[in-house]
């Protein structure tokens, strides 16, 4: 199944810029301080494939670079999704953290405005708000770690001298570790280890 996907994705990636006149071979042109690391690494991997195809490299070297590009692109997709999750979770985390912070002031203000309603004075409401804020921060932290790990794996794939088939084995193993999900045992095991 993965081989079929690679066979289908490879021509698409090549059509998206590596074989056309839009193939940018200048590394300086991809440098921008406002782009995520994953996009920078993806653009650099594209440039390497473009340069390999233009430099009359051997067919084996071209295929190797193209396979590395597919690995990097797969990691790029994963890092991009984690980046989107992080942006959403960070906004909600900040909102709920702010709500927890101002809740006592808001309760006093509502007490003067609406003395007949008492729900805002309930400790259950404030505890729920605090719990939601903590959950959002935990999820943000979890996905930020996954994004960072994926970007580091992209760096390894882009700058590695290993052939693509050996590199693919390592990337598949590491992706398996990334996709394990959240585990409370991993959090508690780290705390139980002696420094």
Image (tube, grey):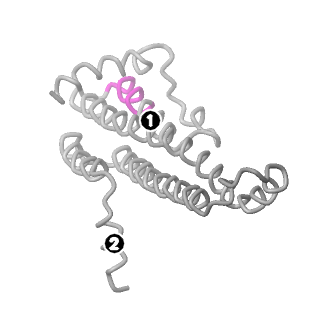
Q: For the residues carrying marks 1 and 2, which lies nearer the camera in this image?
A: 2
Determine whether, in the image, residue 72 is placed left or right of residue 34.
Answer: left
Image vertical order of residue 162 relative to residue 18, above or below: below
Q: Which residue is the site of mark 1?
A: 42
Q: Nearer the viewer, residue 82 or 186?
A: 186
Give the CA separation, mark 1 to mark 2: 35 Å
Q: Point out which mark residue 188 bears.
A: 2
Determine whether, in the image, residue 137 is placed left or right of residue 120.
Answer: left
Q: Answer with the quarter of the image where residue 65 lies.
A: top left
Locate the N terminus and report the quarter of the image it occupies: top left
Locate the C terminus and report the quarter of the image it occupies: bottom left
Q: Secondary structure at mark 2?
A: helix
Image vertical order of residue 39 relative to residue 142, above or below: above
Q: Position of residue 60 (x, y in %)?
A: 21, 30
Q: Position of residue 98 (x, y in %)?
A: 69, 55
Q: Is residue 53 magenta?
A: yes
Q: Nearer the viewer, residue 29 or 193?
A: 193
Q: Nearer the viewer, residue 96 or 28?
A: 96
Q: Position of residue 54 (x, y in %)?
A: 39, 23
> Which residue is depicted at the point 44% across and 19% down?
17
- The residues colored magenta run 47-56
Q: Position of residue 185 (x, y in %)?
A: 29, 67
Question: Crowdedness of circle 2 by 10 Å Cα count: few (<14), some, many (20+)?
Answer: few
> Which residue is depicted at the point 38% across and 15% down?
15
Q: Secondary structure at mark 1?
A: helix
- If you read the primary sequence from the N terminus, does the residue marked by circle 1 or circle 2 appear first? 1
Q: Point out which mark residue 34 bears.
A: none
């Amino acid at each position: 199944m993965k081989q079929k996907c690679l066979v289908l994705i490879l021509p698409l990636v090549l059509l998206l810029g590596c074989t056309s006149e839009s193939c940018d071979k200048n590394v300086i042109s991809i440098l921008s301080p406002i782009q995520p690391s994953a996009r920078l690494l993806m653009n650099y991997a594209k440039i390497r494939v473009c340069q390999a195809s233009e430099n009359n490299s051997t067919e084996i070297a071209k295929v190797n670079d193209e396979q590395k590009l597919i690995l990097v692109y797969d990691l790029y997709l994963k890092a991009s999704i984690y980046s989107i999750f992080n942006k959403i979770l960070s906004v909600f985390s900040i909102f709920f953290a702010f709500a927890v912070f101002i809740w006592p002031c808001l309760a006093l203000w509502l007490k003067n405005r609406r003395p007949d309603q008492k729900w805002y004075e309930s400790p259950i409401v404030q505890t729920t708000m605090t719990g939601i804020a903590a959950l959002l921060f935990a999820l943000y932290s979890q996905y930020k770690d996954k994004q960072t790990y994926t970007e580091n794996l992209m760096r390894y794939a882009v700058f590695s001298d290993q052939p693509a088939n050996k590199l693919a084995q390592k990337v598949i193993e590491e992706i398996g570790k990334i996709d394990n999900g959240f585990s409370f045992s991993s959090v508690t095991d780290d705390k139980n280890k002696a420094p």
